[in-house]
C-alpha cells in the first residue's frame, strides 16, 4: 500500500506594518534633540538679569545741554532741587548706559547692549529696571533732546533755555508747565501727546500733523514766533497754553 505524502501548507508570515510617514520619525527625533539643546538657553534667558541701582551726579553749571538716546525705556525728567544734575537707573552687565560730557558741556546718555544672540531669547527686563530718571537744573542753554522706544517720556515743570525735542515710538509724551527758550518738537507714534506749555498761543508758530487721532491744535505756519512742531501717529494731541 502506497502512502500518499501529505503536503503541509506553510502559514504566511504576518506582515510588519509600515509607517505611513517614513520621514516623520527622523524629523521628530531631530526636533526632540533640538529642544533638549535649546532648553538650557531658554531657561536662562527670562529677562531676569542682575540689575543693580546706579546713579550719576554732575555739576549742573558744567552742563549746557542734554541728549538722551535709549530704547525700551521710560524716561522721567524732573527739576533739580539743588542745581546738580542726577541720573538714576538700573544697570546690568548686558545693559548699561554710556554717559559722557563734551568739551562744550553737552551731556549724552546712551543705552548700551552688550549681548549675545542667546540673551535676546525670552522676556524683557522687568519694568522697574527700565526706567531712567533725570534731575535737571534750569541752566540748560543748549537745549534738551530725548528719544526712546516702548516707553513714555514725562516731564515735570521744567525750564530749558534752548530748544526741546521729545520723540517716542511705542509710548506717549507727557509734560507739565514746560518752558522752552527756543523751539519745540514733539513726536509720538502709537501714543498720545499731552501737556501744557508756558506762554500764550500767539508766541508759537504751530505746525501740527495727526494721523489716526484727534488734536486741539491747528497749524498756523504763517504765524510769527517760536516753532512748535507736533507730529502724532495713531494717538491724540492735547496741548494747553499757560500765558
Image: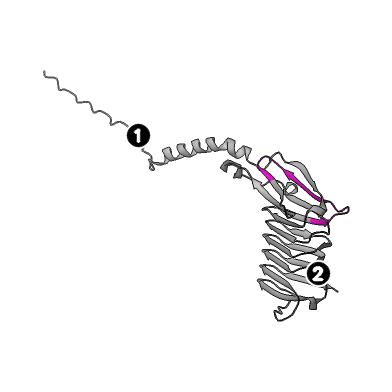
Nearer-N-terminus badge (1/2)? 1
The spot of residue 174 in percent (x, y) is 77, 63
Q: In the rendered image of this protein, does residue 237 appear above or below residue 56? A: below
How far apart, in angstroms, are the residues tagged by discs 1 and 2? 83 Å
Q: Badge 2 is on which residue?
A: 197
The spot of residue 134 in percent (x, y) is 79, 53
Q: Badge 1 is on which residue?
A: 16
Quadrant position of residue 226: bottom right
The residue closer to the viewer here, 157 or 82, is 82
The number of callouts visible is 2
The residue closer to the viewer here, 83 or 41, is 83
Residue at screen point 36% across, 38% down: 18
The residue closer to the viewer here, 227 or 173, is 227
Can residue 123 be seen here?
Answer: no
The reply to whether the magenta stretch includes residue 69 is no
Magenta region: 77-96
SS assignment for the magenta stretch, majority: strand
Q: Is residue 114 left or right of residue 239?
A: left
The spot of residue 25 in percent (x, y) is 42, 38
Residue at screen point 70% across, 79% down: 221
Quadrant position of residue 185: bottom right
- Mark 1 is surrounded, within 10 Å at the Cα level, by few (under 14), some (14 to 19) or many (20 or more) other residues, namely few
Amino acid at each position: 500500500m502506497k502512502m500518499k505524502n501529505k503536503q503541509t501548507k506553510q502559514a504566511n508570515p504576518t506582515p510588519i506594518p509600515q509607517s505611513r510617514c517614513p520621514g516623520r520619525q527622523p524629523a521628530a527625533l531631530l526636533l526632540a534633540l533640538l529642544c533638549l539643546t535649546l532648553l538650557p538657553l531658554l531657561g536662562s534667558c527670562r529677562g531676569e538679569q542682575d540689575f543693580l541701582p546706579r546713579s550719576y551726579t554732575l555739576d549742573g553749571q558744567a552742563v549746557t545741554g542734554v541728549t538722551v538716546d535709549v530704547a525700551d525705556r521710560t524716561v522721567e525728567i524732573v527739576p533739580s532741587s539743588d542745581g546738580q544734575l542726577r541720573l538714576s537707573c538700573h544697570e546690568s552687565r548686558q545693559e548699561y548706559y554710556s554717559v559722557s560730557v563734551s568739551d562744550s558741556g553737552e551731556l549724552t546718555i546712551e543705552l548700551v547692549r552688550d549681548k549675545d544672540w542667546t540673551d535676546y531669547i525670552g522676556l524683557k527686563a522687568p519694568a522697574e529696571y527700565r526706567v531712567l530718571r533725570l534731575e535737571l537744573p534750569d541752566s540748560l542753554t543748549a537745549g534738551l533732546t530725548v528719544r526712546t522706544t516702548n516707553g513714555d517720556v514725562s516731564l515735570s515743570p521744567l525750564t530749558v533755555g534752548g530748544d526741546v525735542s521729545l520723540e517716542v515710538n511705542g509710548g506717549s509724551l507727557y509734560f507739565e508747565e514746560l518752558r522752552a527758550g527756543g523751539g519745540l518738537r514733539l513726536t509720538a507714534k502709537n501714543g498720545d501727546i499731552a501737556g501744557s506749555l508756558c506762554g500764550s498761543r500767539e508766541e508759537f508758530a504751530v505746525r501740527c500733523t495727526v494721523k489716526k487721532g484727534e488734536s486741539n491744535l491747528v497749524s498756523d505756519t504763517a504765524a510769527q514766533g517760536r516753532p512748535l512742531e507736533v507730529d502724532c501717529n495713531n494717538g491724540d494731541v492735547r496741548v494747553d497754553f499757560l500765558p
